[in-house]
Amino acid sequence: MAWRQRPAWAATPVERRIVASPARARLAGTGHPETDVWTYDGMVPGPLVRLRQGEPVRLTIENRLDQETTVHWHGIRLPNPMDGVPGLTQPPIKPGESFAYEFTPPDAGTFWYHPHANSLEQLGRGLAGAVIIEEREPIAVDRDLLWLLADWRLNAQGEIAAGFGNRMEAAMSGRVGNTVTLNGSVSKEEPVRAGERVRLRLVNGSLARIMALRFEGHRPVIVAVDGQPCEPHEPEGSRILLGPAMRIDVALDLQGEPGRRYRVVDDFYDGLAYRVTELAYDEKPPIRSHPLDTLSLPRNPLPELDLADAERHELTLQGGMMGGGGMTGMGGMMGGSMMGGMMGMGGGAAWAINGMSMTGDGHAGMEPVLTFQRGRSIVLNLRNETAWWHPMHLHGHSMLVLGRNGAPVPYRQWQDTVLMAPKDTVKVAFVADNPGDWMLHCHVMDHQVAGLMTVLRVA
């Protein structure tokens, strides 16, 4: 089979209009009721935005919801005014209005887009889509597949359950759903052919669900994390760990038997393993029988770190229930004013970073916890003093993960969303080359809106 050919690209900048509006979707599949959802262009997930590295784009978002919204182009290193944080980088898009996001993506890879206004409910009701930024030269695979995984909390009638912002959940693991979809619907099978090499782009678009994917009978090789190529390697314990907002690209050589089916299982939560889908091989003979060379992706133009001259800072995650980082009596920022106490105990916040809480989705006038000189290399020691997992996302930059709990991290992994286990300490580094005020927050949406968010300034 011939390698996939790149389509011809226009010389003019890409222009596209996407409409945020209510719609209905059959999330649970045939024979199940439709669900009221919020969508981009009437689709769940929203339309795939396919761009090309280094080519300018103008993406206009039209808001037909009955509330304000924005769009955050997650993981793309773009100018600060295009980052989609209401109050901090742009005014929110009011109902009936539009906003044009203009940028030139520097990096190829797998990214995604979602709201950063009322983000807990808007993302939880379906507003999400993937962005694929093509490499300058095509990658040698037979197929390029996207799996945007999401979970939903549906009631007995098949509608999205109420209760967004539950205080108890916000201080624990967040709103984990009861229905997992693959590209917008529950998947029974994904058709494949023996001998294929697939580039499989995995995106976790869930509010809070962490996934650990096992591909029975297969050996996926991780080739990129959060859009950034890494040294190809098999995942530890044969499980692909995917926190909310993370993306992992794998090279999947389909060496199963024609006619057979192989399960893809998520077994992150003890005793709650379930089948995400099955790889369903057709009956045709393999398209090739010999093993292929290891797939390696070209690196993106990330700035060079100067670790010898880097600034070093520590950021400590605190709060939540069940010990470690209690917040009782601690002062913090809540929507620009001082607060104290703990969520569920009369206060508005359940979490903090270095003793300060920022609730919601973004605020004008929020003072940064740290200010960096533009172009300076920065090392952050992220310390999780809580009893819960946190995927920590930095806007506008990609971070090189240097070490975890005192041990170096192999495979040179750059990430914009770093998953931290309870009591983890993770050391990351980046070049503060993108000027502006940038969010750093947990991407468990309940945690973000309940205080686990701060601002880093590049001056």
Image (cartoon, rainbow, N blue to C red):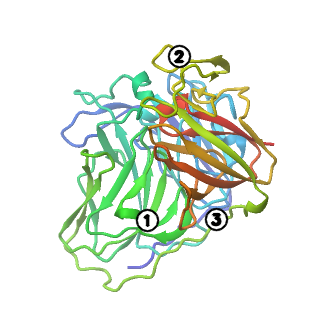
Estimate the spatial distance between the alpha carbons at disc 1 and disc 3, rounded to whole Å. 17 Å
The residue positioned 51% from the left and 28% from the top of the image is 326
> At which x and y percent is residue 172?
42, 31
Rate crowding at label 1 as few (under 14), some (14 to 19) or many (20 or more) other CA atoms within 10 Å.
many
Estimate the spatial distance between the alpha carbons at disc 2 and disc 1, rounded to whole Å. 43 Å
Dividing the picture into quadrants, the one containing residue 104 is bottom right
Say which element carries label 3: loop
Q: Amino acid at mark 3?
A: Asn
Vertical placement of residue 219 versus 418, above or below: below
> At which x and y percent is residue 412?
58, 66
Q: Amino acid at mark 1?
A: Val
Rate crowding at label 3 as few (under 14), some (14 to 19) or many (20 or more) other CA atoms within 10 Å.
some
Name the residue nearer the viewer: 138 or 336: 336
- Screen quadrant of the C terminus: top right
Residue matched to label 1 = 250
Q: Amino acid at mark 2?
A: Gly
Residue matched to label 3 = 300
Name the residue nearer the viewer: 40 or 209: 209
Vertical placement of residue 121 versus 411, above or below: above
- Regarding residue 306, the answer to whether it shows in the image is no
Does the CB distance between marks 1 and 3 fall below 8 Å?
no
The single residue placed furthest to the bottom in the displayed view is 290
Vertical placement of residue 155 versus 135, above or below: above
Say which element carries label 1: strand
Estimate the spatial distance between the alpha carbons at disc 3 and disc 2, rounded to whole Å. 44 Å
Q: Earlier in the sequence, mark 1 or mark 3?
A: 1
Q: Is residue 129 left or right of residue 395?
A: left
Rate crowding at label 2 as few (under 14), some (14 to 19) or many (20 or more) other CA atoms within 10 Å.
some
The residue positioned 30% from the left and 51% from the top of the image is 267
Give residue 347's mark: 2
